[in-house]
Each structure stands twice: as C-alpha cells, then as structure tokens.
Image (tube, rainbow, N blue to C red):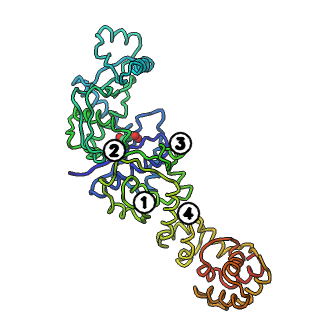
Amino acid sequence: MTVAVRVAPSPTGRLHVGNIRTALINWLFARRHGGTFLLRIDDTDEERSTRAYEEAIEQDLAWLGLSWDRFARQSDRLRHYAEAAQKLMAQGRLYPCYETPEELELKRKMQLARKLSPVYDRAALRLSLEEKRRYESAGRLPHYRFLLSERPVEWQDLVRGTVRFEPGHLSDPVLMRADGRPLYTLASVVDDLELGISHVIRGEDHVANTASHIEIFAALGGEPAALAFAHLPLLTDASGAGFSKRLGSLSVGDLRASGVEPMALNSLLAKLGTSDTIEPRHSLDELVAEFDISHFSRSTPKFDLDELTRLNARLLHSTPFEAVAGRLEALGLRGVDRGFWQAVRGNLSRLDDAAIWWRVVHGELAPLIEDAEFARQAAALLPSEPWDRGTWAAWTEHLKQATRRNGKALFHPLRLALTGRERGPELAALLPLIGRARALARLNGEAA
Ligand code: GLU
C-alpha cells in the first residue's frame, strides 16, 4: 500500500502546539513509510479563513522542517464537492432540511430535558412536497444532511483499537449549507478519497466525525478498508487539567519569538504520548528513524512549557557550530568561530543569548570591581600571551598563592570584573577569547 497522509489546518489562526503535533506525527509517519505528505488548507469557512493565515501556516511548517510533497486548497476544489453532493443526492443519501438554527436548538433542549441524546430527529425526511414548497416560497432555503445508515460503523484505530458506533447515536451530518457551500465534513471526505489518502491521523476530537466520514466515503465509491484512522488524545497542560487557554493559544510564532528551536519542539512533540524517552534530537531524520505510531497510547499527554524550555537548552548545549554558524552571523556576531560557540553554548537557554557573550568577549562593558586591591593584584599577575585554555588555571593558582584567597572569594570577583556578570560560561574558555588587553583594562576598572 502507498502511504499518503495529510495535515489539514484551517487558515483561521496561527498553528498552535496541538496542530503542530498532528502535522509532525503525520509527517513522520509519511517519511517513515516512504509515503507522501499533503498540506491541505481547509478553508471552507470563508468568513474566518484568510490568505495571511495560510501563508503563516506554510511558514511555520517550513520553519519546523515539515516539507510537503503535495498541496491542496479546499476553496479551489468546490466543483468536486458539488459533484459529490449531486452523487449523494442521486442515491437519496443527501436530503434537504429546513430547520433554522433556533428551531434545532429548541429540539436539542427538549431532548436533553427528556434525558434523550440530542440526535437530529430526521423530521425533514417526513416533510411532504407541499410542506417543502411552502418553506421555499416563504424564503427558507434548505441545508442538506447525509442520511447515515442503520448499520453500526466499526474501524481498527491505530491508536484506540476497535472503535464502534451503534446506529442511532449520531446525527445525520450537515454537508451543505443553505447557500450551497460545502461543509468541512463533505470537503474532507471528498479530498481524502480523490487525493488518495491512506491514513487519517488527527485528534480524538474527530472520533465521532469518523463514523460519518467512513459512511460518506463508502457512499462516494471509496473502499473503507483502504482508509485507516488514528486518533490521538489531545494534549493537556502540565497539571493535566485540560489544555489551558494560555497553552491552547500558544502559536508557533510565540514559541519562535521566545527562543524555542524548531528541533526542540519537534523532539518533544514527536514523543509526547508515547513511552519513548524524550531526548533532544538535532535532525528530523533521527525522529523518523525512532518513529512508530504504535507507540502512541490512549493516555492523555501533558504539554509542559518548562519541559520544552529545558529541552531547548539541552539541544543548544549539544548543537555543533556548523548547524548555527549562519544564524549567529545573522545575529550580528561577525566572524564568529567554533571556539566561541564551544565556550558559550553550554550556558544558553536560547540562541540569541549568544549575543550577550559575544559582547562580553568582543564588546565594551563596565566591569564590576568589588575589591580594588585584589583586582590590582590580579591584573599584576596576568600571564603574558599567548593564552589558551590552561591560562585561567595557571593564573588563578598563582593568584591563590599570592592572596591566600580561594573558592568563591577568589573566582567571583574575577568573574564580575571580567564579564560584568554574576554567572556565565566557564572562565577557562572565556578568558582566552577576551584576551589580555581587554582583561587588563577591565581589572583596572576601565570600560573595555
Ligand atoms: N480542518 C480540520 C481541523 O483543523 C481537519 C481535521 C482533519 O484532519 O480532518 O480540525
């Protein structure tokens, strides 16, 4: 079987953590099985969809490295949905309904009050021709529902195992609005069928849709056995209390702006919800090699922003210079080299903080002198150049003997004088980068 998957975001906002996870898992599945990954823009909601969001979605996926092999936009395929609707109508599976939203809401309330499940009662099926005509001459245009069968629907979900819906538990889904525009359910099934999708991998909020999906798919001539489904449990926040509003709206743009590396996000989201250990991975290829859809369980995965932050730092700490050289240059670190990166990377929680250490090494800063006498002694004992990684140990050993200071009393004032900061990368690595002239000036209390 040729694997073909799709990610189908609606361009009504930026991608958020949940959509990215779905996109990533689909992408990994495609790559793992030598299949194709389709980006489908679900823009049947004309009021809320925009081209600007569509472009942002494309940029976000590209930033994550999730390249697509195929592209489709639902608003370009309206003709296909109209044809499918005709086909269903000809089979008597699509029927006109005239209820207003208010009438439907009233029915729902009455069913709930009688402790019945709020399933559409198919009243429209019992309308006579005369009644329909009366509605239409009064200006009411019908919307159209798909007539579900009286048979149970069952499938083997790749995450949930056997899922079964008994007849009578679902409302006949509305496939077409009164103005003739298709709804997501119709468009989605038509696309999955016509674009040859083999696996639909999406959030478990779509489980009930899938029962209808399978029936519509079959009614349009699809072979249900050719379409597999996997429904992933939705993420919750760290407390497990449902996805908080804050996280629910956490977009790729926000994460990117807060310094999150795409591979940190990918490394986390590829494993959340599995029992695999979450480790920083530098390439999507590594995640592809480790990916197995059967590792996803039905238990609810927690998305913890602190975990992402820690993973981001760990990723940076092991990132090779070649992987970031261009980005460091773009941050204004002109002439940046491996030595600098090796010295500072272990101290970064986000890449752009490298610029802070670049200024410490190459820029001017106001030193913090705690004890002028000690600083003077330290300056006097500075070894002559050339300096290397051993210089720091030799110098501080000398200074220790001369001043009888040790531990924090010895090192902390030197750090403050040389870097103007309380904490930072190992001074053994920084000192040779700072160089003798600048170190001397800073120990003398001069801005340098
Ligand atoms: N546009 C739908 C959504 O964002 C796609 C769901 C699906 O994968 O079919 O929920």
Q: Position of residue 109 (x, y in %)?
A: 43, 20
Q: In the visual, does 239 lie left or right of 400?
A: left
Instruction: Left or right? Give the position of 149 relative to 53.
Output: left
In the rendered image, residue 337, in percent from the top left (x then y), is placed at 54, 77
Measure the C-alpha gap from mark 2 to mark 4.
33 Å
Q: Position of residue 96 (x, y in %)?
A: 32, 19
* Vertical arrangement, residue 127 with respect to residue 218, above or below: above
Q: Nearer the viewer, residue 125 or 10?
A: 125
Query: What type is the residue that disc 4 sits on?
Result: Arg
- The residue shown at (41%, 54%) is 272
Amino acid at circle 2: His
Q: Are marks 4 and 3 in contact (CB under 8 Å)?
A: no
Question: Disc 4 designates what residue?
Answer: 350
Q: Which residue is mark 1?
A: 267
SS label for mark 4: loop
Q: Crowding near pointer 1: few (<14 within 10 Å), some, many (20+)? A: many
Q: Position of residue 141 (x, y in %)?
A: 38, 17
For the residues marked 4 and 1, what is the alpha-carbon distance in whole angstroms?
Answer: 16 Å
Secondary element at tag 2: strand
Sequence-first disc among 3 and 2:
2
Q: Earlier in the sequence, mark 4 or mark 3?
A: 3
The dot on residue 255 is none
Amino acid at the residue labelled 1: Ser
Q: Amino acid at mark 3?
A: Lys
Q: Using the image, tell me which numbered label, if any, was put on residue 245.
A: 3
* Callout 3–callout 2 Cβ contact below 8 Å: no
Q: Quadrant of residue 206?
A: top left
